[in-house]
């Protein structure tokens, strides 16, 4: 389900309930691939959710994810979808194989299957179309705008009591 700016909050609100774990996936040194880790860093401590930067080897965090016993896991990653830069899509766990994940060693689908063997969490991926994945590049302007939008959206949906007005 594509996330238009006008329904992002609504779509995320529908899935983010109970004990939530937000996992940023990506290489912080490769331009837009750093989106997931950058977002988790920006919202950590500002939302009622556990936030985890799993870097470019999320499979190394399976044990920690299982130990946290979340009800909902939201993976955030740059995903090649042949769309314009900044295009976002909320992807259900069973839809993940149809999208490219060229920047990671292990498919997130394999990681999800491993997690589901141990816990009954609902798992989603928030994929965002990258513009530039070059080593040493900063986050593109398009993804930086989405980073700020999503930071505010997550705080509105899941902000801690002191952040709510």
Image (spheres, helix red, strand yellow):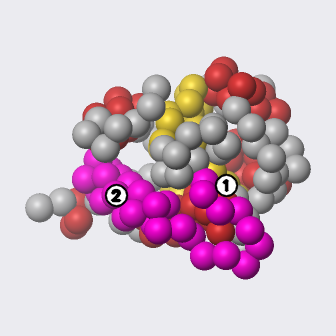
Q: In the figure, residue 38 lies in which quadrant?
A: bottom right
Position of the C terminus by quadrant: bottom left
Across the whole image, how many numbered discs are drawn on residues? 2
> Residue drawn at (57%, 26%), measured in percent from left and top?
92
Residue 93 x/y as whole percent:
63, 27
Asked whether 150 falls inside the magenta stretch, the response is yes
Q: Give neighbour class at mark 1: few <14, some 14-19, many 20+ (Cα, 10 Å).
A: many
In the image, 107: left or right of 33?
A: right
The verdict on residue 84 being magenta is no
Residue 83 at x, y percent in the picture:
56, 40
Q: Which is nearer the N-term, disc 1 or disc 2? A: 1
Which label was assigned to residue 149? 2
Residue at (23%, 65%) from the top-left corner?
Answer: 163
- CA–CA distance between discs 1 and 2? 18 Å
Name the residue: 60% across, 54% down.
130
Q: Secondary structure at mark 1?
A: strand
Does residue 158 lie above or below 109 as drawn? Answer: below
Task: Please give the residue where the numbered disc 1 appears in the rendered image.
Answer: 25
Query: Residue 10, located in which quarter of the rendered image?
Result: top left
Q: Position of residue 37 (x, y in %)?
A: 60, 63
User: In the image, which disc is placed on residue 10?
Assistant: none
Q: Which residues are magenta?
A: 130-159
Which marked residue is nearer to the observer: mark 1 or mark 2? 2
Location of residue 13 with respect to 130 vertically, above or below: above
Along the horizontal axis of the image, is 107 left or right of 129?
A: right
């Amino acid at each position: 389900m594509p996330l238009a700016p006008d329904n992002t909050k609504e779509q995320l609100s529908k899935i983010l309930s109970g004990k939530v774990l937000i996992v940023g996936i990506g290489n912080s040194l490769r331009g837009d691939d750093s989106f997931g880790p950058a977002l988790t860093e920006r919202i950590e401590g500002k939302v009622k959710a556990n936030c985890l930067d799993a870097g470019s080897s999320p499979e190394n965090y399976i044990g920690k994810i299982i130990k946290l016993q979340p009800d909902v896991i939201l993976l955030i990653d740059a995903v090649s979808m042949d769309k314009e830069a900044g295009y976002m899509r909320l992807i259900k766990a069973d839809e993940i194989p149809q999208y490219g994940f060229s920047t990671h060693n292990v498919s997130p689908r394999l990681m999800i299957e491993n997690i589901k063997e141990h816990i009954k969490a609902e798992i989603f991926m928030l994929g965002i179309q990258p513009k530039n994945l070059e080593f040493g590049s900063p986050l593109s302007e398009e993804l930086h705008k989405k980073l700020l939008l999503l930071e505010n959206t997550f705080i509105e949906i899941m902000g801690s009591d002191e952040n709510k007005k």
